[in-house]
Image: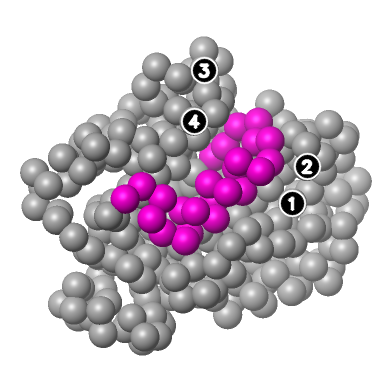
Amino acid sequence: MERIVLPRKFDYNESIRIRDKLKKRYPFLVCHSIGKSVCSRDITAYSLGNYKNTVLFAGAFHAQEWLTGLVLLRFLERICESLKARKELSGVDICASLMTKGITIIPCINPDGVEIVLNGAESAGKLSGFVKDISRNDLSKWNANCNGVDINHNFNAGWETLREMETRAGILGPSVRQYGGFAPHSEPETQALVRFCERNHIDHAFAIHSQGEEIYWSYGDNTPENSLTMANIFSVCSGYELVENDSLASHGGFKDWFIEYFMRSAFTIEIGKGENPLPVSQLDEIYERIEEMLVVGAII
C-alpha cells in the first residue's frame, strides 16, 4: 500500500493533504481542530480509541523542528495500518490496547512558525513585516510563532524564574527564539493545547522536539514517582539518554506545565542528532529507531 506520509517538507498545505488522505483511507480516525494559530491556521488533532483515558503526543512546538510533525504522522499512519489489518505494531496488539486507552496526536502546535521557516516571512500575512523586522530578514534561527513568542517557553511553569533568565540573557521582547511572551499562556497556540488538556483526561503526555536523542522526564516536586521508571523503559527502547532540564530550557515548557498542573507524567523527547532543522532525509532512520518507544509510550 502506498504510504501517505512521505518524506517531504511539512508545510500547512502538505499537512492538509496528509489529513485528507488519512481521513479517506481510515474512516475510524477522528480528526478535529483544537484551536487556531495567530494567523488562523487550524491546529489539528487525531484521536483513536478510548477518549476518556488518552495518551497525548504533540510536536512542532518550535518552527525549525517541523520534522517532528512528520514523525508523529508516520506513527499515526502506522497505527492506522495496524488497526485496519488487525496486525501487531512493534509486537503490540494496538487494537486490544485501544479498547481501554486512547491515543491523541497533535503533529504541529506551531503551524505559523513552520510556515515561516519553510515558505518565508510572507506566510505571516499581516505580520510579515513584523517577522522581517525582528528576524532582521534572517529566518535561519526562527523558532517562534508569528508574534515572536517561543511556544515552549509560554506555559505557566516557573514563569517568573524564566523571565529573569531571559532578561539576563538579553531577551527582552519578541524574538526569533526563547522569548516566553508578555504573560504565560498569552498565545492562542498555547491556549489551545492547555484547553485541550483541561477538557480531556490525559493519562500522560509526550512533547516531541529535536535534536539530541534525549529524554527529559522530570519537573519540580510534582514529578510522579513512576516517571523515572517509565523514562528508563523509553531509554531502553530507543537508546536515547535520560537528561534533566537546564539553562533556558528549565521552565515554561509544555512538559513542565503538564507535570506541575496535573501531577502526571510527561516527557520531552529530543529526536535525532544534528543541526535544526534536521533534514527530511533522516525521517525514516529516526522513526525506525523510536517506533517501539512511541508504541510502548502509548500503551504503558
- Whole-angstrom CA distance, mark 3 to mark 4, is 12 Å
Q: Which residue is mark 3?
A: 224
| Res 61 seen here | yes
Instruction: Specify the quadrant of the image occupied by residue 179.
Output: bottom left
Q: Amino acid at mark 3?
A: Pro
- Whole-angstrom CA distance, mark 2 to mark 3, is 22 Å
Screen quadrant of the N terminus: bottom right
Determine whether label 1 and label 2 are within 8 Å by CB: yes
Q: Is residue 194 magenta?
A: yes
Q: As rendered, which of 2 and 15 lies closer to the eye?
A: 15
Q: Earlier in the sequence, mark 3 or mark 1?
A: 1
Residue 47: mark? 1
Q: Amino acid at mark 1?
A: Ser
Q: Which residue is mark 2?
A: 51
Question: How far across and down, in percent of the image, does residue 200 sit?
Answer: 68, 41
Please provide the residue range marked out in magenta.
183-206
Residue at left offset 36%, top offset 35%: 157
